[in-house]
Amino acid sequence: MRHLLDIMDFSVVELQELIDCAMDIIAQPKKYAETCHGKKLATLFFEPSTRTRLSFEAAMYELGGNVLGFSDGSNSSAAKGESVSDTIEVVSCYADIIAMRHPKEGAPLVATRRTGVPIINAGDGGHCHPTQTLADLLTIHRELGRLDHLTIGLCGDLKFGRTVHSLIAAMSRYEGVRFVLISPEELRVPGYVINEIMEPAGVPYVEVRSLEEAMPELDVLYMTRIQRERFTNQEEYMRLKDSYVLTPEKMKTAKQEMRVLHPLPRVNEISVAVDDDPRAAYFRQALNGKYMRMALILKLLEVTV
Ligand code: CP
C-alpha cells in the first residue's frame, strides 16, 4: 500500500505517469467515469480549504466514487479531544482512501501508522503540500511543454509556504532547472530546504529581494500569499503582507512565454488586472489540480484502466 506524504515519495518516472494519466483523463473523461465505482474517499480537513478539498471531492465523483468527511475539525470529535491516530483508525473502517489536511507538521505521517488505507497529505502546517505540486507540474507541462531547463522564480512567503517547499523538491530533480528565490529577509526559504534538497541536488539558486529585477529572466513566476495564519507576531505580518504585488506594469518586463502560477487563495499579491493576461495560469492551475488528484486516486487505489 502506498501513501503520498511528500512529493519525494514518487519518482520522476511516477510523476510523469501521473501527468500522462491526467492528460488521458482530459482527453477521454468518459473512459474514467466509473473506474472508482463503489469506492469511498474521506476528506478530513482540520484546516480551511477551498481548492484542495473540493477538487479532491470533484475528482472522486468524476471517477464514479463517493465522498465522506468533514471540512472543519471543530465539527469532528477532535473537538472533544480525540487524537489524529484514533480518528484515522476509525475513518479507515469507513473509507477506501483518506485525504487529510492538518495544521501540525507530520500529522499525516502519524496517520499512516494507524490506517489500513492510503493516506494523502493535503497540506501539513508549513511543511509540505504534495498534491498542490502535482497540480503545479501538470500546469507547467501543459503551459510550457517541458519540466526541464526552466528558470523558476518563487516569490513571497518562502519560509512558511508549504507549496514552495514541495515544488522546490520536485523541480530539483529535473535537468537544467534553476531557482530565483524572491522574498523579504524574514521569509527566506528554510535552511533544511537549501541544505537537504537544493544543495545535494546541485541545483543553482539565488536569493534576491527584488521581483522587478528578477522578472525578465523567469520562465515561471510562482507567486505566494503572505500567510497571516502562520505568524505568531501580527505586527510582523502587517509589516510584510504587501511586500510584493504583481501588476500589469511589472508584467511588461516578463518574457512573452513566461507563466504566472499561484497555488491560491490570493489576497493582494496579484492585482486582478493581471488575470486577463494570457500568461496568468493560476485558474487553469486550479483546474489541473482536479485532474492530477483523479490520477493520484487511481494510482493509490491501484485501479487499472
Ligand atoms: N492551494 C490550496 O491549497 O488551496 P486551498 O487552501 O483552498 O485548498
Image (spheres, grey):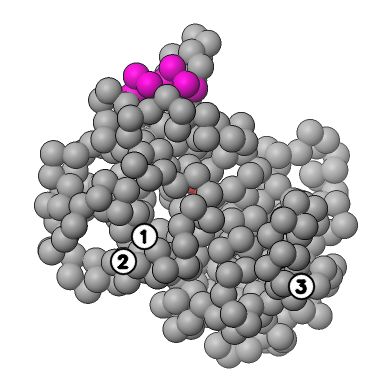
Cα separation, mark 1 vs mark 2, equals: 5 Å
Give the amino acid at mark 1: Met
Q: Is residue 20 visible?
A: yes
273 to the left or right of 76? right
Considering only vertical position in the picture, is 173 above or below 151? above
Span of residues in magenta = 84-91
Residue annotated with mark 2: 22
Binning the other alpha carbons within 10 Å of mark 1 as few (below 14), some (14 to 19) or many (20 upward) gives many
36 to the left or right of 299? left
x and y percentages locating residue 194 in the rendered image: 76, 59
Direction bottom: furthest residue: 256
Give the amino acid at mark 3: Tyr
Quarter residue 68 falls in: top left
- Residue lying at 51% horizontally and 77% vertically, measured from the top left: 147
Question: For residue 214: magenta?
Answer: no
Cα separation, mark 3 vs mark 1, equals: 28 Å
Residue annotated with mark 1: 292
Q: Earlier in the sequence, mark 3 or mark 2?
A: 2
x and y percentages locating residue 210 in the rendered image: 83, 72
Q: Quadrant of the C terminus?
A: bottom left
Q: Are marks 1 and 2 in contact (CB under 8 Å)?
A: yes
x and y percentages locating residue 270 in the rendered image: 63, 65
x and y percentages locating residue 295 in the rendered image: 31, 58
Q: Which mark is residue 205?
A: 3
Considering only vertical position in the picture, is 33 above or below 209? above
Element type where label 2 sits in the image: helix
- Residue lying at 26% horizontally and 35% vertically, measured from the top left: 96
